[in-house]
Amino acid sequence: SKFLNDKWMIKHGFLNDVQEHKPWWWNIKVQKLNLSAPLILLPEVSCQKAIEILQEKGYDQAPVVAESGLILGMVTLSNTLTSVLAGNAQFSDPVTKVIYDQFSKIGLEDSLGKLSCILENDHFAIIVHEQMQFNGNGSSFMKQMVFGVVTAMDLLTFVSRSDKK
């Protein structure tokens, strides 16, 4: 059962420290990765424009975020091209037709150990930060801000470049 799987439990926030012999980087916070701000696409961007933007800016993927701040999913260059070439989407279709809506989120304060568990099954995680936002009438709600997209290569680069100090 997945509830007996420690990695599943860590990924979903039910367990913190599982490994007895953790690597030196296990408890370092995600914010220490110092990733650059992500490229974000709005849902109405066409597949053609998304391909152009990603290629021009040198990105393989980008979160698709509604104007309200709701994270709709992730668009990747390869999935967009594959979908268009297979006839499952048209260049003129919005990127929402080709997004991955299954994705993991991780916070800036979460550990690299938790990130490592997520990246064992997922190609990437979206780094989010929640902040309270207030309306004109004084009511408040939590809004998630996308701070970055992190891959296994980002984690590997950090671990290989950093000292164990």
Image: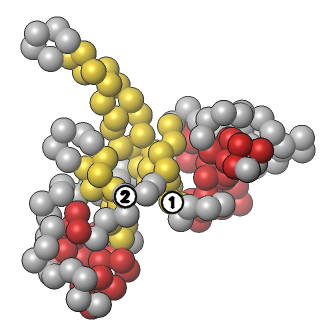
Specify the amino acid type for callout 1: Phe
Residue at 71% x, 60% y: name it.
160
Q: Which mark is residue 101?
A: 2
Q: Is residue 112 visible?
A: no
State the image coordinates of residue 65 (x, y, percent, origin top left).
Answer: 25, 50
Camera-side mark, 1 or 2? 2
> Residue lying furthest right in this view?
21
In the picture, residue 74 is in which quadrant? bottom left
Specify the amino acid type for callout 2: Asp
Asked which secondary structure carries label 1, the reply is strand
Q: Is residue 95 above or below residue 51?
A: above
Left or right of residue 134: residue 107: right
Colour mapping used in the image: secondary structure
Crowding at mark 1 (Cα within 10 Å: few <14, some 14-19, many 20+): many
Are the residues flagged by discs 1 and 2 in contact, CB closer than 8 Å?
A: no
Q: Which mark is residue 124?
A: 1
Q: Which mark is residue 159?
A: none
Residue at 15% x, 81% y: name it.
91
Residue at 23% x, 68% y: name it.
97
State the image coordinates of residue 156 (x, y, percent, origin top left).
Answer: 66, 61
In the picture, residue 12 is in which quadrant? top right
Left or right of residue 140: residue 116: right
Q: Is residue 85 above or below residue 157?
A: below
Residue at 62% x, 35% y: name it.
13
Crowding at mark 2 (Cα within 10 Å: few <14, some 14-19, many 20+): some
First-in-chain label (1 vs 2): 2
Q: How many marks?
A: 2
Left or right of residue 145: residue 56: left
State the image coordinates of residue 93 (x, y, percent, origin top left).
Answer: 13, 73
State the image coordinates of residue 102 (x, y, percent, origin top left).
Answer: 43, 57
| Quadrant housing the C terminus | top right
Q: Is residue 43 visible?
A: yes
